[in-house]
Image (tube, helix red, strand yellow):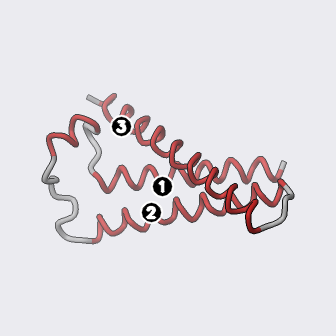
């Protein structure tokens, strides 16, 4: 049963990776349309967009934990349990936001080296 939690975290990491790649592609298109063409500025712009996306995920997950009935079982709980065995919706959004911010931190480490 404890491996279900790890499996859920890997599913969150996979979703976060897909979202981070989508945000990076979208930010690259916006950057090349509106800004200059220097690639180090591009990495900084992608990093900032990933931080904003991850922080928005944190903001949404905080809404789940602050609201009184937000952690109750979902209306489609059986379908949810087929995908995520241990985590509820608030925790999934929180872990996805955390992992998106970690991708932004990785890009920041690449920029600084």
Q: Is residue 44 left or right of residue 52?
A: right
Q: Quarter holding the N terminus?
A: top left
Residue under label 1 = 97
Q: Residues within 10 Å of mark 1 (few under 14, many from 20)?
A: many
Helix, strand or loop at disc 1?
helix
Among the two numbered marks 1 and 2 on one chain, the one whose residue lies closer to the N terminus: 2
Q: Is residue 8 left or right of residue 96?
A: left
Residue 29 placement (x, y as % from top left): 68, 56
Among the two numbered marks 3 and 1 on one chain, the one whose residue lies closer to the N terminus: 3
Task: Indicate whether 4 appears above or below 28.
Answer: above
| Number of numbered discs on residues | 3
Residue under label 2 = 58
Q: How far is mark 1 from mark 2, CA to CA?
A: 6 Å
Residue 40 placement (x, y as % from top left): 83, 55
Among the two numbered marks 2 and 3 on one chain, the one whose residue lies closer to the N terminus: 3
Q: Residue at x 28, y 36 (%)?
A: 83
Q: Is residue 20 left or right of residue 113?
A: left
Helix, strand or loop at disc 2?
helix
Q: Mark on residue 8?
A: 3
Q: Residues within 10 Å of mark 2 (few under 14, many from 20)?
A: many
Q: Residue at x 33, y 69 (%)?
A: 63
């Amino acid at each position: 049963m404890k491996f279900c939690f790890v499996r859920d975290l890997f599913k969150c990491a996979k979703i976060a990776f897909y979202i981070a790649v989508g945000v990076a592609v979208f930010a690259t298109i916006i950057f090349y349309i509106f800004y200059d063409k220097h690639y180090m500025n591009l990495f900084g712009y992608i990093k900032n967009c990933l931080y904003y996306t991850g922080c928005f995920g944190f903001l949404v997950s905080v809404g789940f934990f602050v609201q009184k009935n937000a952690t109750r079982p979902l209306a489609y709980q059986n379908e949810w349990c087929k995908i995520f065995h241990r985590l509820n919706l608030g925790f999934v959004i929180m872990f996805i936001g955390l992992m998106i911010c970690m991708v932004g931190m990785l890009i920041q480490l690449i920029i600084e080296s």
